[in-house]
Amino acid sequence: MSKRRMKHYTVLLAPLLFILWLPKQSAVPDELKAPKVVRGAFGESLTVPCRYQPQFRNNTKYWCRGPIYELCKIVAKTPKQRNHDRWSIADDKEAGVFIVTMRALRPSDKDMYWCVVARPGRNIFTGVKISLSNKVITPTSTVPENSSETNEAKTWWWEPLRWILFLTMLFSLVSTHLAAWMFMTARKRCHPNVVHQQNSNIYE
């Protein structure tokens, strides 16, 4: 196989390997816990506790927004949190929890958010869905004791979407290879002498 063809296959396979590498779970068990859903009311405030293990006491923490973690936008972070009149983040290192506060809630604040602990390599993160309504709701959200519940906070549709992308890229790869093979076969049939001469030049 020529170097050009090898390079072509490498470029096509890279996205496939990346999709397969994406973790099925959103957080490492017991390392980061947060409520699956936090409910609030328009115009009111809410708080979200994100608990972490002692070894991450001095790590940077994030509050990130977006349906998919890999594409989320950082809203607040420690220790140099962004100044904003509607949200803040505070890290209690002794208790092992950082608390996010969202104030003057608006309809546009309803979204998927992520508690994130930065670390070398891949960060630790878990999802929190913010649900809002016109009614005043008494906060009842607690940090789940079962770590498997924390991991299920990942949006449900990302798993099938990942495989759809994988199958689409795999089909494109096979189609490209088949088309190239058919083209070369047809070319040999139409111009056998030319192809033979080109092959001879390659091996000289």
Image (tube, helix red, strand yellow):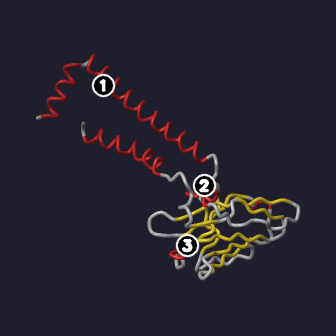
Q: Nearer the viewer, mark 3 or mark 1?
A: 3
Q: Is residue 27 left or right of residue 11?
A: right
Give the labeled residue for mark 3. Answer: 53
The reply to whether discs 3 and 1 touch (Cβ–Cβ < 8 Å) is no
Residue 166 position in % (x across, y down): 49, 41
Amino acid tagged 3? Gln
**Relative vertical location of residue 3 with respect to residue 129 in this rendering, above or below:** above
Give the labeled residue for mark 2. Answer: 68
Residue 68 position in % (x across, y down): 60, 55
Q: Nearer the viewer, mark 2 or mark 1?
A: 2
Picture quadrant of residue 191: top left
- Element under disc 1: helix
Q: In the picture, which quadrant includes the C terminus? A: top left
Amino acid tagged 2? Ile
The one nearer the camera, 201 or 155, is 155
The one nearer the camera, 38 or 45, is 38
